[in-house]
Amino acid sequence: MKQKLVVFTGAGISAESGIKTFRDSGGLWEEFDINEVATPQAWEKNQALVLDFYNKRRKQVLEAQPNNAHTALVELEQKYDVQIITQNIDDLHERAGSKKVLHLHGEITKSRSSIDDSLIYRIKGEEIRLGDKCEKGSQLRPHIVWFGEMVPMMDVANIIAEKADIFIVVGTSMAVYPAAGLIDYSPDGIPKYLIDPSDVNVNGIANLKVIKEKASIGLPKLASELLK
Ligand code: OAD
């Protein structure tokens, strides 16, 4: 049986595809106020503004292409049972060809009913507009986990992490919980790698090898080592 390789990704893996990260200098949360666009309160206050913010994000994602880092994770499937757990709302892992991708923070290509969480739709075209409704008649919202909301896939993700034989973290500031706590669920004794060009605060993680490089450089290198 193949070894289970769990890969936890964040905005940094898609940075070189031209999608802005959140907390780097020039990142999205410098330009936009989280409280105005990414909370249930923001949605209550100004649906048009929230829809516009995510419509712009969606347009950027649709124009972007997967990069070397996404592709390296596909190549690892030759030898490993690769499970990606991503905080990203883009679909670049899927478009690169990765088979198992779990989205913790939702998906920009989908919309959801604002009264029934189980009604999720693939968005046709680039936008959700005011007046676009679910089959129960409520305004469609982006299928995104906002600040202050539960992370419904977290328990599933933690169970996957517990079964990892190797754990790789790529391109996340590890600033947002509960997602950032995922690595704590991985077994102590297994090899762990962190790829990020900046210093990330990961104190107290055993067997962690830090690769201080951009994802498009660091991940293909690590992949070729792991494929030997
Ligand atoms: P952040 O913007 O917080 O962190 C991005 C990380 O990527 C930083 O550690 C950067 O150093 C790193 N980085 C930048 N360029 C890179 C590159 N070329 N290669 C590799 N790494 C690079 O993004 P996340 O940690 O993903 O949530 O943010 C977590 C969550 O906060 C997001 O899922 C989003 C956001 O608010 C929601 O939207 C719910």
Image: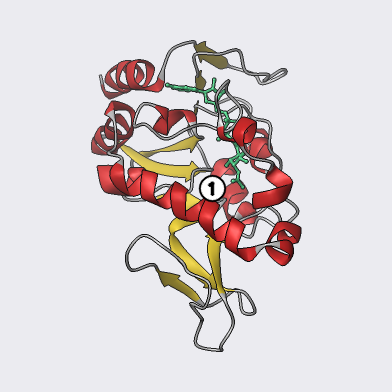
Residue 119 in view: yes
Q: Quarter-wise, where is residue 185 in the image? A: top right
18 and 160: which one is in front?
Answer: 18
Q: What kind of colouring is applied to the model shown? A: secondary structure
Residue 187 in view: no
Q: Quarter-wise, where is residue 83 in the image? A: top left
On screen, residue 41 versus residue 76, left or right, reads right
The answer to whether the beta carbon of the residue marked 1 is less than 8 Å from any atom of ligand 1 is no
On screen, residue 160 versus residue 84, left or right, reads right
In the image, is residue 2 above or below residue 169? Answer: below
Which quarter of the rendered picture does the N terminus lie within? top left
Crowdedness of circle 1 by 10 Å Cα count: few (<14), some, many (20+)?
Answer: some
Which quarter of the rendered picture does the C terminus lie within? top left
Residue at image point 58% right, 17% down: 207
Measuring from the top left, give residue 128's x and y in whole percent: 46, 66
On screen, residue 59 versus residue 57, left or right, reads left
In the image, is residue 225 above or below residue 119? Answer: above
Measuring from the top left, give residue 136's x and y in whole percent: 56, 89
Measuring from the top left, give residue 93's x and y in whole percent: 35, 43
Quadrant containing ligand 1 reads top right
142 and 170: which one is in front?
Answer: 142
188 and 101: which one is in front?
Answer: 101
Residue at image point 49% right, 13% down: 197
Label 1 sits on residue:
160
Measuring from the top left, give residue 9's x and y in whole percent: 49, 35
Which amino acid, mark 1?
Ile
Residue at image point 27% right, 27% down: 68
Residue at image point 46% right, 55% down: 55
